[in-house]
Amino acid sequence: MKGDKMLKGKTAVVTGGSRGIGRAVTLGAAKNGANVAIVYSGDDAAAADVKNLAIEMGVKAEAYKCNVSDFEQARETCNRITTEFKAVDILVNNAGIARDKLLMMMSETDFDDVIDVNLKGAFNFIKHLSRAIIKSSAGRIINISSVSGLMGNAGQANYAAAKSGLIGLTKTVAKEFAGKKITCNAIAPGFIETDMTAGLPQSVRDHAGTAIPLKRMGTPDEVANAAIFLASDLASYITGEVLKVDGGLYI
């Protein structure tokens, strides 16, 4: 985004921050002057790369390996972040996985794993960072949902349920935390060019291209731009909202 550094001096925590949309959000926040805590699950090299790129932008950056679905592990990670950064102003819950199958073929593990990471993981980080965010003069919580959570999607009973649950969580947190001057909003991306969508069959990708009014898939940076806006002072009177970044897929 062009212009002044809208997040200068703030600290942002981004889960799933080493790849795809999370990587773009992390680097977008750093570009706009925010110190960044990168929470990731597996790829040490990718996390180190994002961390180094952020540091090159002149901000503080650290990477934290964490299974966001583990309540105690999330608590320990959040404690480390608040100790090392002293303050947390922005939380972006982006960590997510997909285990796509038709419901009749979906195992209990397929369902539980997606709910645990995509939905419970967001709860864990909001829970454990809430006190730190309340101390901020302009706390922001942003949950990365999906248009699947708004309209459902065949083969994604687990994913759609988790992303729909994130929207309910967002609206509830917005109401509970409003008195503390904290806003909580969700972003619902459509088809975005990431590793997750790269694994889709070509027939699905082709159909997506024709179904999207803007006739193309989105980019991680386009989702990150929405997150930076919601994290900034420009969005100080917006809370409990779901911002679709989908090229018009769900109108």
Image: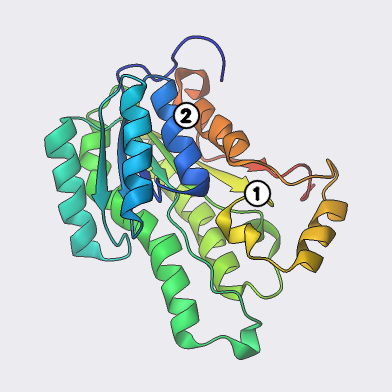
Which residue is located at x 49 percent, y 56 percent?
A: 166
Residue sitting farthest toward the top: 4
Image color mode: rainbow
**Image spot of residue 16 (x, y percent):** 40, 51
Position of 189 with respect to 93 (left or right) is: right
Which residue has dot 2 on it? Answer: 28
Local crowd size for mark 2, using a 10 Å CA cut-off: few (<14), some (14–19), many (≥20): many
Whether residue 139 is visible, yes or no, is: no
Whether residue 234 is visible, yes or no, is: yes
Three-letter amino acid code at the position of disc 1: Ile
Local crowd size for mark 1, using a 10 Å CA cut-off: few (<14), some (14–19), many (≥20): many
Q: Nearer the viewer, residue 118 or 67?
A: 67
Instruction: Please determine whether, in this image, residue 250 is positioned above or below residue 197.
Output: above
Residue 101, by quadrant, is bottom right
Which residue is located at x 58 percent, y 60 percent?
A: 196
Q: Nearer the viewer, residue 242 or 9?
A: 9
The reply to whether callout 2 and callout 1 are in contact (CB within 8 Å) is: no
Q: Give the SS element for disc 2.
A: helix
Instruction: Please determine whether, in this image, residue 142 is positioned above or below residue 123.
Output: above
Which residue has dot 1 on it? Answer: 192
Q: Could you tell me how far apart the alpha carbons at marks 2 and 1 are, in whole angstroms? A: 17 Å
Pointer 2 or 1: first along the chain: 2
**Image spot of residue 104 (x, y percent):** 64, 90
Which residue is located at x 25 percent, y 48 percent?
A: 64
* Marker disc for residue 152: none
Which residue is located at x 53 percent, y 53 percent?
A: 167
Three-letter amino acid code at the position of disc 2: Gly
**Image spot of residue 131 (x, y percent):** 21, 40
**Image spot of residue 92 (x, y percent):** 41, 42
